[in-house]
């Protein structure tokens, strides 16, 4: 077209930019952007929308998309939604929510695609308060119920720790697709309610809907986190034989997790060795995590070696292997692992916990003293620790994976990030309201026991989401039943 000197118009540029978005070809998109500016089409609404969309969808250049978006004179609901989706797609959930707030201030009415995207953003940053506000805003606007939006709403509530709210939305849905059922099954699975997940799966089949491969991943995950080994094996076989679904790597990973959590480590390893796929780092990490729980150094070392062959700079694998050695008091081997980490310049991801209070996230690290209310937090923690001791709590120092004197190990446990977040939540929220804590790593085993005591002492439900699942603590018990 250029060779024949045919002049491109706004339709042409919009079409070609859409092609760049699909292909992820940002370099070609930038060249087109230059041409658009030269001929003065950058103020055209349609071209501006597709240009912003191209930048938003092409990785690492979200900021470029925002610059284009900020210069647009005519920003409609499509423009706003594309930019919000672009931010979310590249892991910028907070920025996505900030854009939505700007959209509201601009007086632009959201559509169903906007709402579904924004609920996804709330889920990505675990902002239950924001999710509830936007849900209320949706009702106030009188936006017609749509299964696409309701599915996103169920998913948001589940991922933000409120299965009660997820269930309310699900039960009111006039139309449920397989995605609706799968979202709810996934929610129960991640919250440790394995039997509820299975019951829901059986109900879904009675409606005549056929489960997808994703549905089975959720069911197998539910079985693995609830210790339902026989049921998990049956569902895996049924998926292959009754539903003609060819197992994916994710299904095999769930089976490795199922057997590994139950302590059947050799069976778990056999699945990896015999499956038709080339094992990736995730499946070996699943086995390594199980070896950490059950203290199997031989299989754990083998799994760690396989992971480091695939991902030489994977900090989590070094840490898990080091923890296996530390739990067995093999401090020389711990030192060797840490020395190798230094030599390869691998840094451990620091553990942190956070809690949302009045629409603001408060983040804590172990022994953290940077929060403005540090003195009140530590005073509350000291009070709780005394009450826990009186109730029979005994610190389990085997979870301190450092060669320290016993009293220092106890002090280390008492100031883990999840406990600091809980103490802050207790002094800053009304009595008897649930606390929802998020953690980027697996919750400490001793903290798991401590939170049971705390839930009884303070008379509150405490929901903790760690890297693997949700734990619901109530009256001294946890929803995981000690199986996690």
Image (tube, grey):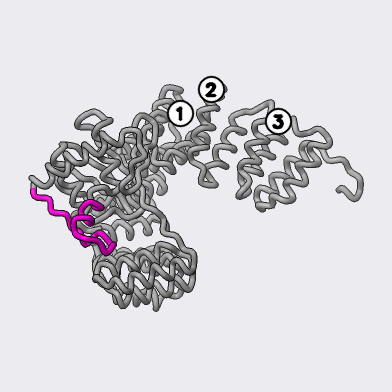
Q: Is residue 76 above or below residue 355?
A: above
User: Could you say which is closer to the camera, residue 161 or residue 15?
Assistant: 161
Residue at the spot 16% in from the left edge and 37% down from the top edge:
458
Q: Which residue is mark 1?
A: 144
For label 2, count other residues whose C-alpha is less than 10 Å away and answer few (under 14), some (14-19) or many (20+). few
Q: Position of residue 85 (x, y in %)?
A: 55, 40
In primary-sequence order, the first of circles 1 and 3 is 3
For label 1, count other residues whose C-alpha is less than 10 Å away and answer few (under 14), some (14-19) or many (20+). few
Q: Nearer the viewer, mark 1 or mark 3?
A: 3
Residue at the spot 62% in from the left edge and 41% down from the top edge:
63
Q: How far apart are the alpha carbons under marks 1 and 3?
A: 28 Å
In primary-sequence order, the first of circles 2 and 3 is 3
Q: How far apart are the alpha carbons under marks 2 and 3?
A: 20 Å
Q: Is residue 48 left or right of residue 112?
A: right
Cβ atoms at labels 1 and 2 below 8 Å apart: no
Q: Position of residue 174 (x, y in %)?
A: 37, 36
Task: Write down the region rendered in magenta.
Answer: 392-413
Q: Is residue 101 above or below residue 452?
A: above
Q: Is residue 23 above or below residue 124?
A: below
Identify the disc placed on residue 45: 3
Q: Is residue 88 visible?
A: yes
Q: Position of residue 297 (x, y in %)?
A: 29, 74
Q: How far apart are the alpha carbons under marks 1 and 2?
A: 22 Å
Q: Is residue 409 magenta?
A: yes
Residue at the spot 25% in from the left edge and 61% down from the top edge:
404
Q: Is residue 87 left or right of residue 23?
A: left
């Amino acid at each position: 077209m250029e060779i024949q000197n045919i002049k491109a118009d706004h339709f042409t540029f919009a079409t070609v930019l859409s092609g760049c978005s699909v292909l992820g070809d940002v370099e070609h998109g930038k060249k087109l952007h230059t041409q658009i500016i030269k001929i003065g089409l950058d103020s055209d609404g349609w071209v501006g929308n597709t240009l912003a969309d191209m930048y938003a969808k092409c990785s690492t250049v979200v900021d470029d998309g925002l610059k284009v978006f900020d210069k647009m004179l005519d920003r409609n609901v499509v423009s706003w939604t594309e930019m919000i989706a672009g931010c979310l797609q590249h892991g910028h959930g907070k920025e996505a929510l900030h854009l939505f707030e700007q959209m509201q201030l601009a007086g632009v009415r959201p559509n169903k695609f906007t709402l579904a995207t924004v609920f996804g953003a709330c889920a990505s940053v675990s902002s239950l308060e924001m999710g509830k506000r936007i849900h209320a805003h949706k009702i106030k606007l009188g936006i017609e119920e749509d299964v696409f939006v309701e599915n996103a709403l169920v998913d948001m509530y589940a991922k933000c720790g409120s299965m009660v709210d997820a269930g309310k939305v699900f039960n009111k849905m006039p139309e449920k697709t397989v995605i609706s059922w799968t979202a709810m099954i996934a929610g129960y699975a991640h919250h440790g309610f394995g039997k509820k997940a299975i019951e829901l799966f059986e109900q879904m089949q009675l409606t005549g809907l056929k489960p997808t491969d994703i549905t089975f991943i959720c069911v197998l995950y539910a079985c693995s986190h609830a210790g339902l080994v026989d049921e998990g094996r049956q569902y895996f076989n049924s998926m292959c034989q009754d539903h003609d679904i060819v197992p994916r790597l994710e299904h095999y990973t769930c089976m490795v997790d199922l057997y590994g959590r139950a302590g059947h480590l050799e069976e778990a390893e056999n699945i990896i060795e015999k499956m038709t796929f080339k094992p990736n780092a995730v499946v070996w990490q699943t086995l390594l995590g199980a070896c950490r729980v059950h203290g199997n150094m031989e299989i754990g070392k083998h799994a760690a070696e396989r992971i480091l062959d695939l991902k030489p700079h994977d900090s989590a694998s070094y840490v898990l292997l080091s923890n296996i050695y530390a739990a067995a008091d093999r401090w020389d081997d711990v030192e060797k692992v840490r020395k190798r980490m230094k030599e390869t310049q691998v840094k451990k991801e620091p553990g942190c916990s956070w809690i949302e209070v009045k629409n603001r996230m408060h983040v804590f690290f172990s022994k953290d003293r940077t929060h403005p209310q540090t003195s009140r937090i530590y005073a509350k923690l000291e009070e709780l620790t005394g009450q826990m001791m009186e109730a029979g709590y005994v610190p389990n120092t085997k979870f301190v994976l450092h060669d320290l004197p016993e009293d220092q190990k106890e002090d280390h446990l008492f100031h883990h990030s999840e406990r600091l977040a809980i103490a802050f939540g207790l002094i800053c929220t009304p009595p008897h309201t649930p606390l929802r804590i998020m953690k980027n790593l697996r919750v400490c085993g001793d903290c798991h026991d401590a939170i049971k005591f705390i839930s009884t002492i303070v008379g509150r439900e405490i929901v903790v989401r760690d890297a693997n699942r949700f734990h619901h603590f109530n009256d001294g018990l946890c929803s995981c039943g000690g199986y996690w």
